[in-house]
Image (cartoon, rainbow, N blue to C red):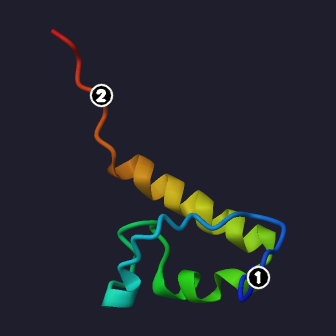
Amino acid sequence: MAGVILTPGVDSPCVARCSTALGDAVCKGCGRTFEEVTFWNVMDDAQKQAVLARIAAERAAATPPDMPTV
């Protein structure tokens, strides 16, 4: 595949709906900041895991608890 760099390690959380290209500070698709998107390919695995943990924590905090069934 010409032009594609394949590197082992932590996969990108990209879901191909990037809103940082539209000026958002945080991507509405993957939850990464503009800087995290920009520098993802030069981050080491520990840095990438930290980003993924932050995204998971923020999503968990934003998710409302299950509503009780009646």
Disc 2 from disc 1: Cα separation: 41 Å
Lateral position of residue 17 relative to residue 39, left or right = left
Say what amino acid the circle numbered 2 marks: Asp
Q: Which sits in the foreground, 15 or 38?
A: 15
Q: Nearer the viewer, mark 2 or mark 1?
A: 1
Residue at x-position 46% and y-position 70%: 16
Q: How many marks?
A: 2
* Quarter of the figure with residue 68: top left
At numbered mark 1, what does the secondary structure look like: helix, strand or loop?
loop
At numbered mark 2, what does the secondary structure look like: helix, strand or loop?
loop
* Quarter of the figure with residue 67: top left
Which residue is label 2 attached to? Answer: 66
Please, which residue is most extreme toward the right here? 8
Q: Tell me residue 52's x, y (percent).
A: 60, 61
Say what amino acid the circle numbered 1 marks: Ile
- The quadrant the C terminus occupies is top left
Residue at x-position 80% and y-position 77%: 44
Q: Tell me residue 55's x, y (percent).
A: 51, 61
Which residue is label 1 attached to? Answer: 5
